[in-house]
Amino acid sequence: MTDRYAVFGNPITHSKSPRIHAAFAEQTGQNLAYEARLAPLDGFAAAVAGFRDEGGRGANVTVPFKEQAYALSTSLSARARAAGAVNTLTFAADDVLGDNTDGVGLVNDLTGNLGLDLAGKRILLMGAGGAARGVMPPLLEQGPAELFIVNRTAAKAEELVALAYSQGVGATLAAGGYADVSGRFDLVINATAASLSGDLPPLPAGLFADGALAYDMMYGKDTPFLAFARREGARCADGLGMLVEQAAEAFFLWRGVRPATAPVIALLRAN
Ligand code: NDP
């Protein structure tokens, strides 16, 4: 029997997740099929329930459904609860287990593939949607000197910080709007959807410390944020490594086998 998995999003045609999981399955000898499914904007829960009824074993969840996936999970991992967002669902007998692998995916890319040590660093995280929520707790675990969360709608960034404080973390955490961004940062992460529409959030010049890294979670094309960062002298990385690393963590949750990520990142870059 081939076990079935899917990724749900809207839009979804751009998704590389089916190729990544196919490569992991081939590499580890796992018998599974993984497809991309478009969920209607007002029909996410029904789409997931339908896939489960067809025999689906689990699913990934992408824009804009991660908070809805959190709501429909009947049990949550600690990191999903801390994030308030879910990107990986596992279907058990009567349960839907919700987890969030975005944060560990980003941290593994930053510290493993890109060789960063985040302890004592100043980090600026742009955005307060599902992706930002997912990466906030694992970034804090790395012991940065400061994590400043900035969002177009400042109140949403402030809510995120309040959530972290209420869970007993966040001594180095602060939030605000773009007008509140000041000083120089060692790492600036774009977790907004601005790159999808070709927009650049209103960042001040002189933002990057010497040797700083600019990280755009978007992948597959150059973005206004990375172009800005390059002009400002920062090192740049896109989100392809994060994508493969979060997928590897989901694959491990579902199959109990940890695939090697470097060959899959190389394969996607070559294409
Ligand atoms: P959401 O829709 O949940 O959140 C979008 C966020 O972007 C909000 O904070 C929103 O601000 C902000 N935003 C949207 N447009 C603009 C703009 N023009 N200027 C400034 N801010 C803007 O999306 P996600 O958090 O799920 O995803 C965000 C991005 O991260 C996407 O591009 C996604 O593809 C990418 N991603 C990549 C991953 C990877 O593995 N590489 C994993 C997860 C996500 P406001 O609150 O004011 O509306």
Image (cartoon, rainbow, N blue to C red):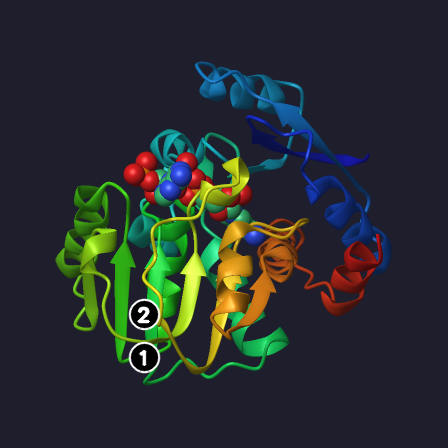
Residue that mark 2 sits on = 140
> What type is the residue that disc 2 sits on?
Leu
Task: Tell me what residue is drawn at x 57 percent, y 82 percent.
Answer: 115
Q: Is residue 114 left or right of residue 141?
A: right
Residue that mark 1 sits on = 143
Q: Is residue 173 left or right of residue 208?
A: left
- Ligand 1 location (quadrant): top left
* Mark 2 closeness class: few <14, some 14–19, many ≥20 residues within 10 Å: many
| Residue 107 visible in the current orientation | yes
Circles 1 and 2: CB atoms closer than 8 Å: yes
- The quarter of the picture where residue 242 lies is bottom right
On whether ligand 1 comes within 8 Å of the CB at mark 1, the answer is: no
Q: Is residue 70 left or right of residue 180?
A: right
Whole-percent x, y for residue 129 in the image: 36, 42
- The quarter of the picture where residue 48 lies is top right
On whether ligand 1 comes within 8 Å of the CB at mark 2, the answer is: no
Judging depth in this view, the residue of 52 and 6 nearest the camera is 6
Whole-angstrom CA distance, mark 1 to mark 2, is 6 Å
- Location of the N terminus (image quadrant): top right
| Secondary structure at numbered mark 1 | loop
| Secondary structure at numbered mark 2 | helix
> What type is the residue that disc 1 sits on?
Gly
Whole-percent x, y for residue 52 in the image: 59, 24
Whole-percent x, y for residue 159 in the image: 18, 47
Q: Which of the labelled discs sits on residue 33, or is there none?
A: none
Judging depth in this view, the residue of 110 and 166 nearest the camera is 110
Task: Tell me what residue is drawn at x 45 percent, y 31 percent.
Answer: 65
Q: How many marks?
A: 2
Task: Tell me what residue is drawn at x 56 percent, y 49 percent.
Answer: 218
| Residue 86 visible in the current orientation | no
